[in-house]
Amino acid sequence: MKMLAVFEKGPRLRLIGHLDLMRAMQRALRRSDLPIRYSQGFNPHILLTFAAPLNLGAVGEREIMEVPVEGTVDPAFFLDRLNAALPPDLKILACRAVEDTHKSPMALLRAARYSAQPEGGADDVAPFIGPFLAQKTVPAVKKTKSGEKEVDIRPMIHELSCRDGRIFATLDLREESTCKMELLLDRLYAFAGLETPHFLVRRLMLLGEDGNAFVPLEDV
């Protein structure tokens, strides 16, 4: 059995990297005394997996991780025990039990929904969103392990809008095609002829796919 857990990484922890997040979760799982399943071998460890790393500096409102457990565990019990061992701003919001044969969240992940709060609001860039989306291509330079690579991010942008001083976007988050919110904002502000301001990025939700429609990954 595996427990699929939805958790929040709050604003005060936005500068904690992915490896530190993993360690914090592993320590909390050990303190919780939950029947967690460990790997076999000379150095047993918790078989913890995350749907996708969160960029440094971003808030995660509904992140997803998968925790293998021994036997049958009540989701409400799992949530309460793990939350009791976690620090503020890192809390389990929901969880459900799935079979071991259930595909991993990473394998089911297709996209993510984001918001960005620029300093001073987004009114200055809002009029440029329509023309920006009307472009057939949006060239951008992505940093990869092998160096910099020029890509067209337009097919990776599924939605882009502005309201209440914030910018919202739905972007590809697949192994073969990923567009970060920071890269999109850089290209949008460059298109508008504006200097890119400082902003707080929130990953609002991770998305899977049902047919041709995106759905919350936690429900897939």
Image (cartoon, rainbow, N blue to C red):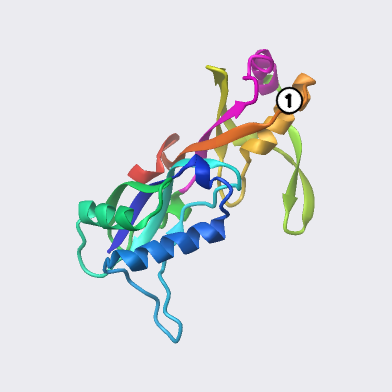
Considering only vertical position in the picture, is 197 above or below 50? above
Relative depth, front residue between 158 and 42: 42
Q: Residue at x 55, y 56 (%)?
A: 18
Residue for badge 1: 189
Q: Residue at x 31, y 61 (%)?
A: 2
**Quadrant, the N terminus:** bottom left
Q: Residue at x 28, y 56 (%)?
A: 98
The percent position of residue 22, horizontal first and vertical second, equals 48, 61
The percent position of residue 193, horizontal first and vertical second, equals 80, 20
Q: Which residues are magenta?
A: 109-133
Residue density around tag 1, few if under 14, some if 14–19, many if 20 or more, within 10 Å: some
The percent position of residue 169, horizontal first and vertical second, equals 56, 29
Residue 99 belongs to the span the image colors magenta:
no
Relative depth, front residue between 169 and 116: 116
The percent position of residue 24, horizontal first and vertical second, equals 46, 60
Q: Residue at x 41, y 68 (%)?
A: 47
User: Toward which corner of the image does residue 133 lie, by quadrant?
Assistant: top right
Give the residue type that dot 1 points to.
Tyr
